[in-house]
């Protein structure tokens, strides 16, 4: 076995690993789990109070 054969086997191994990771990541059975994980950063957020800002035209009338 020479170096070029080893390089060929390693390339095939990496391609198989890449395909496996892609299959795992885009598998329909994992979609719900990944969607829940994507929402985790927003889980503790408190909704902002609904403050209405007055338009600049109203400020001129107040003076």
Image (tube, grey):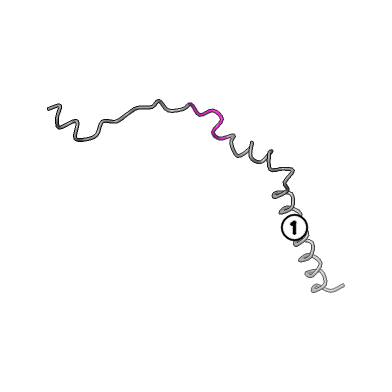
The quarter of the displayed image where residue 32 is located:
top right
**31 is higher (above) or lower (below) than 23:** above
**Residue at 56% across, 30% down:** 43
Q: Nearer the viewer, residue 51 or 18?
A: 51
Q: Position of residue 2 (x, y in %)?
A: 84, 74
The quarter of the displayed image where residue 49 is located:
top left
Q: Position of residue 62 (x, y in %)?
A: 15, 26
Q: Quadrant of the N terminus?
A: bottom right
**53 is higher (above) or lower (below) than 34:** above
Find disc 1 in the rendering and name its residue. 19
Q: Residues within 10 Å of mark 1 (few under 14, many from 20)?
A: few
Q: Quadrant of the C terminus?
A: top left
Tell how many labels.
1
**17 is higher (above) or lower (below) than 33:** below
Q: Could you tell me which secondary element the residue under label 1 belongs to?
A: helix
**Residue at 73% across, 57% down:** 18
Q: Is residue 16 left or right of residue 52?
A: right
Which residue occupies the extreme left position in the image? 63
Q: Main secondary structure of the magenta part?
A: loop
Q: Position of residue 35 (x, y in %)?
A: 63, 40
**28 is higher (above) or lower (below) than 54:** below
Q: Nearer the viewer, residue 45 or 12?
A: 45
Query: Which stretch is magenta?
Result: 41-46
**Residue at 54% across, 33% down:** 42
Q: Nearer the viewer, residue 18 or 48?
A: 48
Q: Is residue 47 left or right of residue 36?
A: left
**Residue at 70% across, 50% down:** 26
Q: Is residue 27 magenta?
A: no
């Amino acid at each position: 076995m020479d170096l070029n054969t080893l390089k060929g086997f390693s390339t095939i191994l990496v391609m198989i690993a890449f395909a496996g990771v892609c299959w795992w990541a885009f598998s329909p059975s994992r979609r719900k789990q990944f969607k829940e994980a994507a929402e985790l950063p927003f889980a503790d957020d408190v909704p902002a109070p609904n403050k209405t800002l007055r338009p600049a035209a109203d400020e001129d009338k107040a003076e």
